[in-house]
Amino acid sequence: MNLKRLTFLALATYAMLAVWAITDVKESSPMLTIAPRQTITLQDLTPQQLADRAEELTATTTTTTTSTTSTVPFTRLADFDPDTKCQEWFQTAITVGWPNNTETLQKLGRLLWKETRCLNITPMSSDPKLADRFNGHDHGVAQINEIHTKYVEQVFNMPFAEAMSDPTLNLRFAYLLYSDIAEGGGCGWKPWRLC
């Protein structure tokens, strides 16, 4: 059950109890009528909001001669098996929204290992070996399929191949896929056949 539904149910229950307490309903009273469900409409992000989010996600590290300044916050990672594959991507994954817990990180490591052996495989790679490994339709470290082109371009306001070549955006979109399915009660790992 997602948090919005749980909150709605809690508020509806509270409202019914409040009505009952105020009207001093007796057991012999006629049946109470419940107000119709309220509908909340979510809208797509505006182009400016999409651009702002894409800019936040593509923030890069700035290096000076005396120190390194990072715009990406460092988070202490949950404990996981030291033999977990692809752990070099965990800090980025946490930064873009992935849950910081042992089970999720270990499964994310298995996913990245299964899909790309921890490599950012894209047709836009400057490394010819990585570009040669591109299968023609799955992009980046989490192998996001071109079937999601419209969704990716809407979220990041940039061409699909360019967005999914950036490992930060690739992992962010992978999390969006995962969380959309998980919030609906399904297995978030389904796009990668890890359920």
Image (spheres, helix red, strand yellow):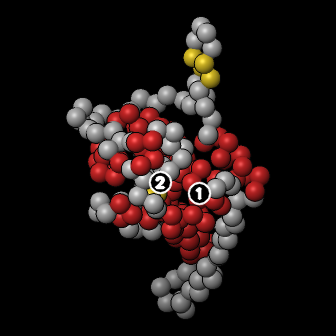
Q: Quadrant of residue 21?
A: bottom right
Q: Quadrant of residue 99?
A: top left
Quadrant for the N terminus, please.
Answer: bottom left
Label 1: few (<14), some (14–19) or many (≥20) C-alpha neighbours in 10 Å? many
Q: Which of the pair 140/188 is nearer the observer?
A: 140
The amino acid type of the residue labelled 2 equals His
Left or right of 130? Residue 53 is right
Placement of 18 over or under 135, stated as above or below? below
Of pointers 1 and 2, the one earlier in the residue sequence: 2
Placement of 116 over or under 186, stated as above or below? above
* Label 1 close to label 2 by CB (< 8 Å): yes
Q: Is residue 16 visible?
A: yes
Question: Which label was assigned to residue 120?
Answer: none
- Residue in view at x 42 percent, y 44 percent: 130
- Residue in view at x 44 percent, y 65 percent: 181
- Residue in view at x 57 percent, y 17 percent: 68
- Residue in view at x 56 percent, y 31 percent: 72
Residue 8, image x and y in percent? 55, 67
Label 2: few (<14), some (14–19) or many (≥20) C-alpha neighbours in 10 Å? many
Q: Which of the pair 1/135 is nearer the observer?
A: 135
Name the residue carrying label 2.
139
Name the residue carrying label 1.
160
Q: Is residue 104 visible?
A: no
Q: Secondary structure at mark 1?
A: helix
Residue 11, image x and y in percent? 56, 66
Q: Which of the pair 26/109 is nearer the observer?
A: 109
Placement of 134 over or under 13, stated as above or below? above
Q: Secondary structure at mark 2?
A: strand
The amino acid type of the residue labelled 1 equals Phe
